[in-house]
Amino acid sequence: MHLGQPTPEAVGRLYDEATDLLLAAMGGNIHLGYWDDEDDDSPIGGATDRLTDLVGARLRPAPGQRVLDVGCGTGRSAARISADYGVHVTGVTVSAYQVEVARRSPPGAAGSTEFVLADAAARLPYPDGSFDAAYALESLLHIADHEAVLSQITRVLRPGGRVVVADACLRRRPDEGTLAVIAQMSAAFQFADIPTRSEYHERLAAAGMTVIEYADIGEHVRRTYFSAAETVRAAADGFDAQTAAEMAATADLLVGFGALPDIGYALITASA
């Protein structure tokens, strides 16, 4: 479902301005968290790290391999995967501030990391076959041209390299009320596209990838929206009245989007 055409510059500005608040809202990461069930009382930082672990487990990189992180945020996921598997992770992002934050962070103890300002939908600054595996953790959501970015990922991977995509998905054709909430989220958070399952399959195949597994884990990550909304509301107390009102509206939007049953979360494993 195409939502808009946010430019890389607009997405970069969003994260330049919002990264610190998002880090607080999501426990040090800038992606959703994973809870086993309603009784799972893990803090949000633990839940967001767990989603990183699910991505790493599907990548299955061998020690010493090179892994590409498309939309690396502040580098916490890259450092975690690097440390867990003893690999070198290269992260790219369109946010100059995120590159700065990521470069200040210590690399994974058993591996290494580097971070680069680059637009993955234009051309990745690496030769063909440079990486053994790649993942895109909630970055495709901001990119209108999935064919371009997925083709770039395929190009820089060695043949047979694994790819993991973790991002929002659309479960069915939404009604008008659902469309209105999605449109508001698109405007507020620079969303470009929320594909259906069939659209993900078609786009990955068009880029030369074969899907190994498609899982919709939406009910396991939904709690993140409500938790993040609470953090945003609490943070609003320290701002002027107008900014506080805007933050309260953002919190309401997060709750409304998180409650949409038509929105799931795709965890896809593929090979190039």
Image (tube, rainbow, N blue to C red):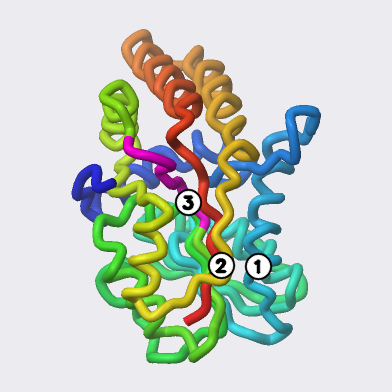
Asked whether the residues under the numbered discs 2 and 1 touch, taking CB atoms below 8 Å apart as contact, a structural biologist would say yes
CA distance for labels 2 and 3: 12 Å
Which residue does the image show at 31% across and 49% down from the upper left?
193
Where does label 3 land, which residue? 167
Looking at the image, residue 128 sits to the left or right of residue 33; the answer is left
Q: Amino acid at mark 3?
A: Asp
Q: Is residue 231 magenta?
A: no
Answer left or right for 32 relative to 150.
right
Cα–Cα gap, marks 2 and 1: 7 Å
Q: Which residue is identified by label 1?
A: 58
Quadrant in which residue 112 is drawn: bottom right
Q: Which residues are magenta?
A: 166-173
Disc number lying in front (2 or 3): 2
Residue 192 is situated, as x and y percent measured from the top left of the image, at 28, 48
- Measured from the top left, where is residue 211 in percent x and y? 50, 71
Q: Which residue is mark 2?
A: 269
| 248 in relation to 228, above or below | above
